[in-house]
Amino acid sequence: MEYFEIIILSALWKTIINKYYEGKDQAAQAVLSPTVTDTIWAAIGRILIQGNRQVDYLPRKFATASLLFGIHNGDALSETCLLKSWLASLGGFDRHLMGET
């Protein structure tokens, strides 16, 4: 059964990441829009927690800040974590360029 749960979670995360996140290498939350409510972010967090509890599965595509925001509702985010996650969401050359500044 675990195999099918992981397949379902993988498909769900692919859909969620494509809809609410952006980034080439890692997924960071897209600019918040008024149509994306706290209820949606809370639901994403609950799915992250439940998927981790049930089948020990967390999507690798998420940037660290995205995982912390989903699980802890942003309470555990530092400026350093946000900056590192944003840099990780950039593609190779862009990341290199921004890392130099």
Image (spheres, rainbow, N blue to C red):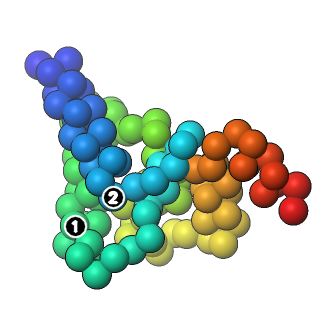
Which quadrant of the rendered structure holds the N terminus?
top left
Q: In front: 49, or 25?
A: 25
Determine whether 39 is above or below 55 in the image.
below
Marks 1 and 2: in contact by CB < 8 Å? Answer: yes
Query: What is the number of the mark on residue 40?
Result: 1
Residue 29 showing in the rendered view:
yes
Q: Is residue 7 above or below residue 15?
A: above
**Image point 63% across, 49% down: which residue?**
90
* Residue ID for mark 2: 20
Q: Which amino acid type corresponds to the residue marked 2 in the rendered image?
A: Tyr
Between residue 13 and residue 48, name the one nearer to us: 13
Which image quadrant for residue 56?
top left
Residue occupying the far right of the picture:
100
In this picture, residue 85 sits left or right of residue 62: right
- Residue 39, how many percent across, how many down? 20, 72
SS at circle 1:
helix
